[in-house]
Image: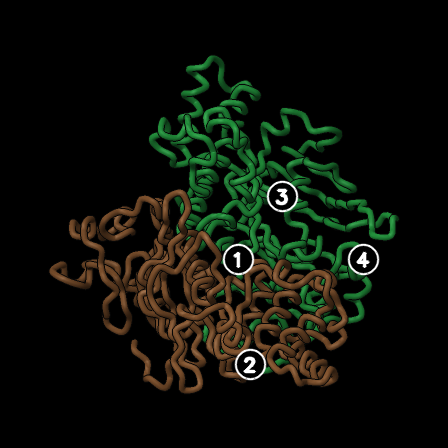
Amino acid sequence: MTITQSRPASPATTEPPLLEADHVTKHFRVRDGAGGTSTVHAVEDVSLALHAGRIVALVGESGSGKTTLARLLGRFYPITGGQIRLRGAAVTGRPDKAYFRSVQLIFQDPFGSLHPGHKISYNLERPLRIHGHARGRTETRRQAAELLERVGLSPAEDFLDKLPHELSGGQRQRVVIARALAVQPDVLLGDEPISMLDVSIRLDMLNLLARLRDEEALALLYITHDIASARYLCDDVAVMYAGQLIESGPKDAVIQQPMHPYTRLLVEASPDPGRDRADLLGTSAEEDDGPDEPPSLIDPPSGCRFHPRCPFAMEECRRRLPERTDLGGGHWARCWLHQKGRTEELIDRD
Amino acid sequence: MTAAAEDLLLDVQGLSVTYFGDRPVTACNQIDLQLRRGEILGVAGESGSGKSTLITALTRLQRPPAATTGGRIVLHDQGQDVDLVGLSEEELRRYRWNTVSIVLQSAMDALNPVLRLGAQFADVIRAHDPKLKTGDILDQTVELLAMVGIPADRVRSYPHELSGGMRQRAMIALALACRPKLVVMDEPTTAVDVVMQRRIVRQILRLRHRLGFAVIFVTHDLSLLLELADRIAIMYAGRIVEIGSAEEIYRRPKHPYTRGLRDSFPPLHAPLRTLTGIPGSPPNLLRLPAGCAFADRCRDVMDVCRHDRPQLLPVDDQLAACHLYHGTAGRPASGADTGAALSR
């Protein structure tokens, strides 16, 4: 398993992506209090590519559209605009079995995503049978046992005949991952797969995901609000704010030298035991002024949606979200500072 | 770690809490804790470690089937020592809000949904000082809300009109309404984002500095406590297994569980290495082993750990309950000072 500083920077350019969102937009129609309807602009013009053997972390606050994007990629709902491509081919219409055979989703809550009335064996054998990977009772059970061993639940015989409630949260989440693997997908979409687990077993799960990437060349989308775990696990980071993707690149480029004011805020807000307490207290109260939370997506701010919270906000920011500025090595950001030649204002003085 | 007598605010001795269900479960076992005035004590533990039980016991908010089966919670206030365990509900009312207040995990459920924010503050403030005029109460409410960065016009808002982060901050302001000596916080930032979490933590630190209250802050997030707390207590299976300054817990954790917990948080900036977490899962409190509850997951386990439960005893500048440091076993051969590798 490789948890390293530097995996090869970006094979992205050489190999076509397995799964790709191309300028994807999703608007939901919701009923408002007055009996009319309004539109939630959940995902706006997002492009993101997943490659075999690489993990992309999608980070952002809750309500930023991370989960919606994962579900669009998992084709839980139709997209409003743009295109989703699997191995280069655009996917349209109702998703078929072939799509789900390639792309599987891991939900956040291991307590709610297994059938509580059925044994673990049933939960695993069903996808094996549905997707035609196993025939006959003995063969199916053997494969289910193999899956459990793969996710570190051994001896498998101890788990196959248990009901989900007899397992701990960590064990259940392993079963959820095993079930996704039963389908033999090429792409795994993990929607905060460890956030409901106890701290001491989270790393185990991250190491398991890293192993799947390294040994089976799975393409993985890891959704989280925990920047430190994203840095630990992933190769690339994509940052989402209020439905817009605002920065992306190799993890250490993005986390150590954020090139969008929002990414900088997010990294600075993340707990870091190495930080000085005085640093945390801040020097003045000024940072506490202004809106402190993501905007409503029913009536999102114009232009760059971060502008009401941005210390650098200019007239342009209110009008239009700028194009991506290529910062080299696969790192890009969508911020007017780069367009105006003011990049150095984002770089830490120390 | 004994504080000077005049400095001591809270002295918990041998506190035990049992849930009397079909089979009794002791969720807090012989807890000893001291809290100084103005100190922030962090309590870290995983689910089932007994940290929330400890909070409800300390604030005397527990309800059956939970019952305090032993110990004392001595509050040193205005020259008097009061054991909260012995007090009736009526007597406890004198201390609630005024001396000890609580901030619960979910502000959504803790604020009354059908009352405006101002009315809820007025209730608390009036309980503290029944003679106050309405205008003065409003002034105080506005001032309290301003302390946590909520604009004055929000006094007329209902809880559902506020964002999650704002509700949580309103709860903190409410807890401070009667200038308590101790504010107990049960995972106050788990339901909010990192950006809001940072802001709440910063406000707690600033307000503590200004008003001088002490805080007991309970969370599963050790990395947050390392930044926020002065001292940290680590709970495992209903007991405190280590307690020491935040600096010591981070740099030189003594208990193998503390070490494992610390190493379960990947660093944000320091060089990455493969971390292993802690193998296994926390024990079932119904079937606790005879010796150390952590023995089955411990890398340094010895024979003595299987049958003898270690006591919480001084090790260097902190307290730890581990046989590695006490008795015949001597010092551990490995791992005790891995903190150096993590520091920048």
Which percent across, then down, holds residue B38? 45, 80
Which comes before the other along the chain, label 3 or label 1?
A: 3
The residue labelled by disc 3 is A49
Q: Residues within 10 Å of mark 2 (few under 14, many from 20)?
A: some
Q: Amino acid at mark 1?
A: Ile
Task: Give the quarter of the figure containing the N terminus of chain B.
Answer: bottom left
Q: Which badge, 1 or 4, comes first in the chain's sequence?
A: 1
Q: Residue B120: image x %, image y %?
A: 68, 70
Mark seen at residue A299: 4
- Whether residue A200 is situated above or below residue B181 in the rendered picture: above
Question: How far is mark 2 from mark 1, CA to CA?
Answer: 36 Å
Identified at 61% across, 73% down, the residue is B174
Q: For the residue labelled by badge 2, is the local secondary structure a helix, a strand or a loop? A: loop
Mark nearer the viewer, 1 or 4: 4
Q: Can you identify the residue that label 2 sits on?
A: B179
Q: Are marks 3 and 1 on the same chain?
A: yes
Residue B82 pos. (x, y %): 40, 77
The image quarter in which residue B334 lies = bottom left
Snapshot quadrant of residue A289: bottom right
Asked if marks 1 and 4 fall on the same chain, the answer is yes
Quarter location, residue A186: top right
Which numbered tag is attached to residue A227? 1
Which residue lies at the image location 63% right of the left edge and 33% below the top edge?
A: A87
Q: Are marks 2 and 1 in contact (CB under 8 Å)?
A: no
Disc 2 with disc 1 on a shared chain = no
Tag 3, which chain? A
Q: Nearer the viewer, mark 2 or mark 1?
A: 2
Judged from the image, the secondary structure of the residue bearing numbered disc 1 is helix
Looking at the colours in the rendered structure, which chain would you say is drawn in green? Answer: A
Amino acid type shown at disc 3:
Ala
> Which residue is most to the left?
B328
